[in-house]
Image (cartoon, coloured by chain):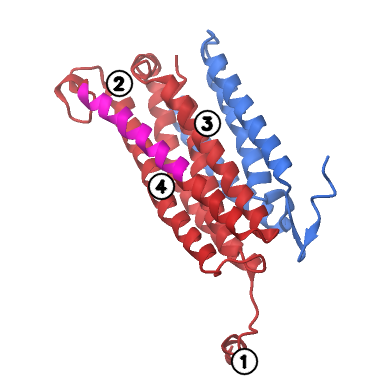
Amino acid sequence: MTSGAAAVAQGHGHRDDVGAKLGMWLFLFTELILFGGMFIVYAVYRFSHPTEFHVAATELDTLVGTINTIILLTSSLTVAMSITAIQKGNKWLSFTLVGFTVMLALAFLVNKYFEWGHKFEVGLYPGSAILLNKPPGEILYFGLYYVMTGLHALHVIIGVVVLAGMMMFIAKDKITRHSYVRLEAGGLYWHLVDIIWIFLFPLFYLLH
Amino acid sequence: MEHHEEQKHHGTHVISYGRYLLIWLGLLSLTGITVALSGLDLGQWIIITAMTIASIKTLLVANIFMHLKFEDRMFRVFVLVAVVTLLIFIVLTFFDYAFR
């Protein structure tokens, strides 16, 4: 323990990239269980109110959902490519690719803002008089829609902050071709956000 | 294809840009298929096909984008344990709800 700490202090301490990545995966499992619990609630209510879920889902715009899916898949591509770029020593290409990812994430949030904004305009928000007059299954559907896509959007916002941090690390040479495990961990988080959306999209938008 | 590009760097696997682009095209095609299928009247099958396609997309993202295919076997064991745990939650919940 003390010898290890001394070695780190001398600058040639041992680095455990595999351990770091495994730690990141363990964190992702807690996220899996967090969203997994909500998917179970969704499954149970959809099972008990099948027709009302179908009716409520027609309120959602499939085109907006599809565009956001394409945006997130593309952002996953750019963050994955940024790791190849840093492995090949192309610092600024890697920086630019993470930058693209951040811009795509912001585009996703802008779409989400207009989508939610439109729902609020037509009175479909939690607790609104219009929604409360609908059958219980539709109220449940919109409750789940707001909580699940809302929690996902919160993850997108956190992802933007994390990835912006990665850009700063790349610019300051804290992430280099010889040490890029932080970028890998940031990328893993972003891919998880993408995977959650891969399931949210068909469950909420493609119910017709 | 492009195997010469996927060389080993410092003991780690470098995945070529071309391979990432192929996976991305596959993910976009699968998205197109799910959206197209949702327009058809598949009844009960719609949820099964949609979840199958989402699972295939997840496998592509996890294996290639998240490098799971190239990591130590231990990573895949960990992921399997986590996913099986979630599946147990789901199956047990439905044993309760489906037979009430």
- Which of marks 4 and 1 precedes in the sequence? 1
Whole-number angstrom distance, CA of label 4 to CA of label 3: 18 Å
Residue bearing the label numbered 4: A155
Marks 3 and 2: CB-CB under 8 Å? no
User: What segment is highlighted magenta in the picture?
Assistant: A103-121
Which residue occupies the foreground of this view, A1 or A188? A188
Does residue A146 sit above or below A46 in this rendering? below
Whole-number angstrom distance, CA of label 1 to CA of label 4: 39 Å
Residue A154 pos. (x, y %): 36, 46
Closer to the eye: label 1 or 4: 4
Residue A153 pos. (x, y %): 38, 41
Does residue A198 sit above or below A178 in this rendering? above
Q: Secondary structure at mark 2?
A: helix
Q: Residues within 10 Å of mark 2 (few under 14, many from 20)?
A: many
Which chain is tinted blue? B
State which chain disc 4 sits on: A
Residue bearing the label numbered 2: A138
State which chain disc 2 sits on: A
